[in-house]
Image (tube, rainbow, N blue to C red):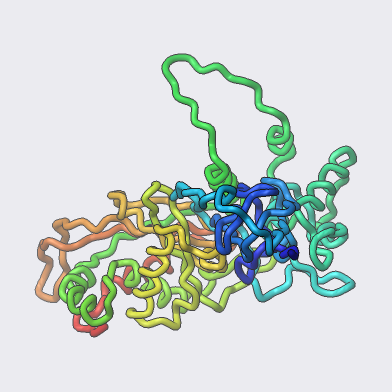
Amino acid sequence: MSLVDLIMPKLGESIMEATILKWHKQPGDVIAMDETVLDIATDKVDSEVPSTAAGVIEEILYKENDVVPIGMVIARIKTGVTVTPATVTPPVQKTYEDANVVEVIPFQPTASAPIATASNGMRFYSPLVLNIAQSEGISMSVLESISGTGQDGRVTKKDILAYVTQQSGSPKPVSSAEQPVAFPTAPVQNQVAVSNPVAEVSYQGNVEIIEMDRMRKLIAKHMVDSKRTSAHVTSFAECDVTNLVLWRERIKKEFEKREGEKITFTPLFIEAIVKSIKKYPMLSSMVDGDRIIIKKDLNIGMATALPSGNLIVPVIRNADQLNLVGLTKQVNGLANAARNNKLKPDDTVGGTFTLTNVGTFGSIMGTPIINQPQVAIMAVGAIKKRPVVIETPQGDTIGIRHMMYISLSYDHRIIDGALGSTFLNAVSKELENFDSNRSF
C-alpha cells in the first residue's frame, strides 16, 4: 500500500488559486480512477477534479470554501487496498447546473507579465488577491510588503484578509504615491456596511425571497465595481447592414457545406471591430493609475447566452490574425463550449474589447457595462427591416433596408466623446460598406 497525493490542478496560465466548492468524497470513501473527488471554482468557471489513482481517501487537507494555491496537495489517496464489492460505492450521478459561469470578466493582469517586483525577485498576485486589494484600498507598495504563506511566498487570500483585519483598528492616510491597486475603492461607509450583518427586514404582501447564489453575488460585485471604476458614457449609431445580410443569406449553405460550420453575424461584427480598432488603438487599452496601457494583442470577448439565462464572455485571442473562416470556427467553438460548461479558465481571460449582441434577445439597442479592466464594450441590436431614405446621384428614394443600432459604452477617463463616436462611426461604415461580392 502507498499514499498518492492529489494536488490542486493547473487550470490555466493565469490562474494561481481556486476555491473548493464541494467534496464528493470523504476520508474512508472508496474512489475509482478518474472519478470526481471535488468541485472547484475560479472567478469565472467551475471545474471538477478527478482522482489520479484508485483506492481509498486517506486524508482531506482543506475544507469547503478554502482558497488553495495551484500545485498544493489537497488530499491523499491510499492505493493498493483490497476492497470487497459490497463496500464499493458507485459513482454519484451528479446533476449539473448550467449557471456555473459569471457574466463579466473581472480585472485580470496579463499572464505573461509580473504584477509586481519585490526585492527578492518576481511576485505574482492572483485575481482574487488583486480584487481584495482594490476593494480595500491597499496600494501596490503595501501589497508588496505583505508576507505571503502561499507557494513561493505568494500572497494568498488568507494573508491579505489577515492584513486587512490587523489594519482595520488603526487606519492610516494613503499618500499620493501609494494609490490603491488598479482603481479606486468604495467609500468607507460602504465597506463598513458590507462587513456588518444586515438586519432582518419584513416585507409586506405576497412576496418570494430568493437568496443570491455565489455566482449572482460575483456578478453583482463586478457590475458595481465597474460602474464605480469607470466613468461610463454610451454613444449610439444606426447602420444599414443590407449588403451584409443579403451576402450571408446567399452564401450560408455553401459556407456550411465547405467549412462544416454555420456562419452567424458575430464573426462579421468582430471582423468590423478589429479593422476599426487598428485605426483607433486606444479602444484596446486599460488604465493603470495615471498610465494608459495600449494592448497590441487584439483579444475580442463575446458575450454568450446560456440555456440558464446567464452569460459568459469567452475570448477570441489574436482576432486580427484570423480570417472570416477562422473567426467563425473560434466563435462557434467557444459558444458551444460555454453552453456545455466545457470552457477552461483561460478561455475567459485576457480580453481587450468586448462585443455583446443584445439583438439576440429582441432588444434594438443597449447600454452595456464595461468589462474591467477594458475601456470599451460594443452592443449590437436586432436587425430590423425599415423604410429609409436612400441617397443616390439621381436623387433620394425610399427603400426597404435592413437597419441596426449599435452602441458603444466607453471609459470617459481616457476616451472622449469625439474618439468614442468616431470609432463607433468607423464600425458602422465597415458594416455598411460590406463587399457583397467578396468570397469567404
x 39%, y 47%: residue: 309
Of residue 234 and residue 44, the one placed in the foreground of this image is 44
Residue under the point 88% across and 73% down? 120
Can the viewer see residue 227 in this picture? no
Q: Name the one closer to the observer, 125 or 409.
A: 125
Q: Is residue 390 left or right of residue 267?
A: left
Q: Position of residue 110 (x, y in %)?
A: 63, 70
The vertical placement of 205 against 163, above or below, is above
Image quarter of the C terminus:
bottom left
Q: Quarter-wise, where is residue 17 in the image? A: bottom right
In percent of width and height, residue 28 lies at: 68, 49
Looking at the picture, tell me which residue is in the foreground, 165 or 154: 154
User: Residue 305: in sight, yes or no?
Assistant: yes
Q: Quadrant of the N terminus?
A: bottom right
Look at 73% across and 72% down and name the residue there.
114
Whether 55 is drawn above or below 308: the answer is below
* Rendering quarter of residue 117: bottom right
Residue at 57% in and 43% down = 214
Is 357 positioned to the left or the right of 6 in the image? left
Image vertical order of residue 196 relative to residue 176, above or below = above
Residue found at the very far top of the displayed protein: 204
Q: Position of residue 112 (x, y in %)?
A: 66, 76
Q: Is residue 285 left or right of residue 191?
A: left
> What is the x, y in percent for residue 4?
72, 65
Q: How many marks?
A: 0
